Amino acid sequence: MNKSETAKVLSYILADYDAVISENLLNVWHDQFENVAYIDAMRGAKLLLSKKTFGRPKCADLHECLEAMNVKCSPEEAWGHVLKCAQSIGRYDQSKALRLLSSISPEIANAAEPIYLELCNSEQKEWSTIRAHFWKILNATQSRSKVTELQKAQDRNISHELASDTLKYSGASHKGLITFKTV
């Protein structure tokens, strides 16, 4: 997003609060969201204003909404995003390209990192091999994140059960492990 687009997003958000946009405020928001596409920032702003908030929204609030909007895209769509970044940004600012891809999906950015320079330095006839490598990395990254999400959910369930006072010792043990039952 360029600075004028950032000003549009910020004015849209702050219009609900009758707030004035200072140059410092605009600079901070532009610094925070320069790697986010304008259309995504506006969608995030609309989502932000639909939520009940206390006080004027902060950058972190919009980041949270953008993260909540972050939907999984197909490998073909992910490859399209990577290809578009490689063609528009090129190899000279890989960190900017990866930040932009991360605003779309952190998984896409993680999968694109090892192949990005190779993609930028290759010819179009070599892209199918690089694409296949990217898809394998993306699939592995998405699988790892699913496992991590499941582990976090299990940890939350276990900690919730342990926090409740309704656990009783079952008396049964398997290979020295103590098991508990909820009552």
Image (cartoon, rainbow, N blue to C red):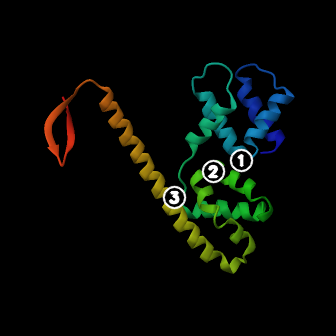
Q: Quadrant of the C terminus?
A: top left
Is label 1 in a helix, a strand or a loop? loop
- Give the amino acid at mark 3: Thr
Residue 172 position in % (x across, y down):
13, 40
Q: Are marks 1 and 2 in contact (CB under 8 Å)?
A: yes
Q: Nearer the viewer, mark 2 or mark 3?
A: 3
- Numbered-mark total: 3
Residue 144 position in % (x across, y down):
47, 55
Q: Nearer the viewer, residue 183 or 39?
A: 183
Looking at the image, which residue is at 71% across and 62% down?
84
| Residue placed under numbered mark 2 in the picture | 104
How many residues crowd around disc 2 within 10 Å: few (fewer than 14), some, or many (20 or more)? many
How many residues crowd around disc 1 within 10 Å: few (fewer than 14), some, or many (20 or more)? some
Q: Nearer the viewer, residue 56 or 110?
A: 110
Is label 2 in a helix, a strand or a loop? helix
| Residue placed under numbered mark 1 in the picture | 37
Q: Is residue 100 left or right of residue 107?
A: right
Label 1, label 2: how far apart the Cα atoms are: 9 Å
Q: Which mark is residue 141?
A: 3
Residue 58 position in % (x across, y down):
68, 28
Q: Quadrant of residue 5?
A: top right
Q: Quadrant of residue 90?
A: bottom right
Q: Quadrant of the N terminus?
A: top right
Residue 40 position in % (x across, y down):
67, 44
How many residues crowd around disc 3 within 10 Å: few (fewer than 14), some, or many (20 or more)? some
